[in-house]
Image (cartoon, helix red, strand yellow):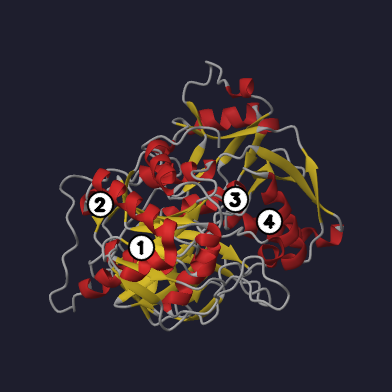
Amino acid sequence: MNEELSQDTLAIPEASADAQPQTLAPKSKSILPEVKRRRTFAIISHPDAGKTTLTEKLLLFAGAIQIAGSVKARKASRHATSDWMEIEKQRGISVASSVMQMEYGDCVINLLDTPGHQDFSEDTYRVLTAVDAALMVIDAGNGVEPQTLRLLEVCRARNTPIITFINKLDSEVKDPLDLVDEIEKVLKLTVVPFTWPVGMGKRFAGVFDIRNDQIRLFRSGKDRLETESETLQGFDHPELADRFGAEFEQAKQEIELITGASEEFDKDAFLNGQQTPVFFGSAINNFGVKEVLDALAELAPAPQARAAIQRVVHPEEQAFSGVVFKVQANMDPAHRDRIAFVRVCSGRFTRGMQLKIGRTGKSIRTASAMSFLSQRRELLEEAYAGDIIGIPNHGLLQLGDTLTEGEKLQYTGLPFFAPEIFQAVEVADPMRAKQLRTGLMQLGEEGAIQVFRPHDGGALLLGAVGTLQFEVVAHRLKHEYGVEARLMPTKHRLARWVTADDPAELKQFIDFNSYRIAYDVVEAPTFLASYQGELVIPERWKTIKYHALREHAGLMFQSKLAG
């Protein structure tokens, strides 16, 4: 993934100027009130910034759980709700995105926790195509880190609104003014502080809510929600100077400085991804979390119109449409299930309705559709635009598939990046070869790793953007499929998907380069190279094109994704 993400890399395609929303059926009850209640957002960050911990605390404050779990839980403690895989519990990292739905006030919140580690960034990129806003977590000790910047570029390509939470103020960290300046200079976002820290580390007293002119005080080390938190109103409150001394005076000066220098909050600029409200706190100690949750409910947009190849689709339309942005295998290891996660883009979903897959034209029934609190699930009776639903999948649904009630639609923008690291895979026990192939095909379909079948036969090839992906796949093959796999190095270092305007020329190219050709999980031909120079296309191949990105969609390669 060395290629830079350009401004239009993952941009939504232009729809025709005369595209109109589908007319609402006059006898149908408007779904607009339900749509307006939805808030769908992803939490993004560099690894170890505290993203998963913040997810737990948001669930706690929303009332979805009673006790917050820990990412690195002791034996007697709870693990984080969003880290449900065994390897996540062992390593204390997130390796797959998870979906959680909860109600907060009058809002229905769909929260997606994403892997922070760069090796699993593809999963995060795909999740970001399914949300309307992002909550960016920054480690106050480290400031803006490389993965934060990469993820922000993806958000920027889609003009995704971003709320920023600066975490770990309970530690000795960078000066808050320096952090704000860094966000503006490195991320090129206009910062509008909504809260400000009073002290840091052992002297951390709480956060001052600038808009409401009050300081909220918290006790440290809480995994349970306190029924009432202590607040003091106004900077002129007589207790503040007495209780917090120099920290309070410094915070007061900084707030006066920052409010004088900062721009006023502009809702339109925020919704266009140009301005970010900033909150300070400590997720692990419940500092500043409620303010973030309140802001998400108040500021994050309701579901927006989405452009399909055919037309613009509006969320309040009566007809259902949705897109598969994630496939997860073995959420229930006892049943070896596969769940397709669908972002509802328009209309109302009801359990049992028959839906058509745009790519194949086949129909599926949805009697077992479900909602999630990470791994925990329950049958879903209905859902509206903005919601995330899970549909049990037995191989019919793939990443990027569009589901409708019959209309021919294709949503785009779900990316697959060309891998940069390859390993061949063989089964240690030849009697388990079938299980190996099944496991790899299913893991390939979910996007955990890319699986390639060489044109000339031989061992399957695994392609990844980071070495940790191989470790996770080997672990999951062993524990979820009962297969001990041998991973071996290969000579391949680069890959490009291949297309041609002339099908006959493409066949000739594949035959000529058969020893370099492999097919991915959807049988897209791929050229494998050992070094950059092999990617030069000789002049004899007039219509051959290489692609560093491909779409999970009916149209395999979109021009904006061409590499």
Q: Is residue 113 above or below residue 311?
A: below
Q: Which residue is mark 4?
A: 440
Q: Which residue is mark 3?
A: 117
Across and down, in percent, residue 294 comes to 33, 69
Nearer the observer, 179 or 42:
179
Crowdedness of circle 3 by 10 Å Cα count: few (<14), some, many (20+)?
Answer: some
Q: Which residue is mark 1?
A: 208
Crowdedness of circle 1 by 10 Å Cα count: few (<14), some, many (20+)?
Answer: many
Q: Residue most toward the front?
A: 242
Q: Which residue is mark 2?
A: 311
Q: Please give left or right for residue 482 compared with residue 226 in the image.
A: right
Q: Is residue 64 above or below residue 356?
A: below
Q: Residue at x 61, y 47 (%)?
A: 119
Counting residues from the N terminus, which is met first, the one under dot 4 or under dot 2? 2
Across and down, in percent, residue 485 comes to 80, 55
Mark-to-mark CA distance, 4 and 2: 36 Å
Which mark lies nearer to you, 3 or 1? Answer: 1
Q: Please give left or right for residue 24 compared with residue 292 in the image.
A: left
Across and down, in percent, residue 526 comes to 59, 37
Mark-to-mark CA distance, 2 and 3: 36 Å
Nearer the observer, 169 or 88:
169
* Amino acid found under the numbered disc labelled 1: Phe
Residue 490 appears in the picture as rendered: yes
Counting residues from the N terminus, which is met first, the one under dot 2 or under dot 3? 3
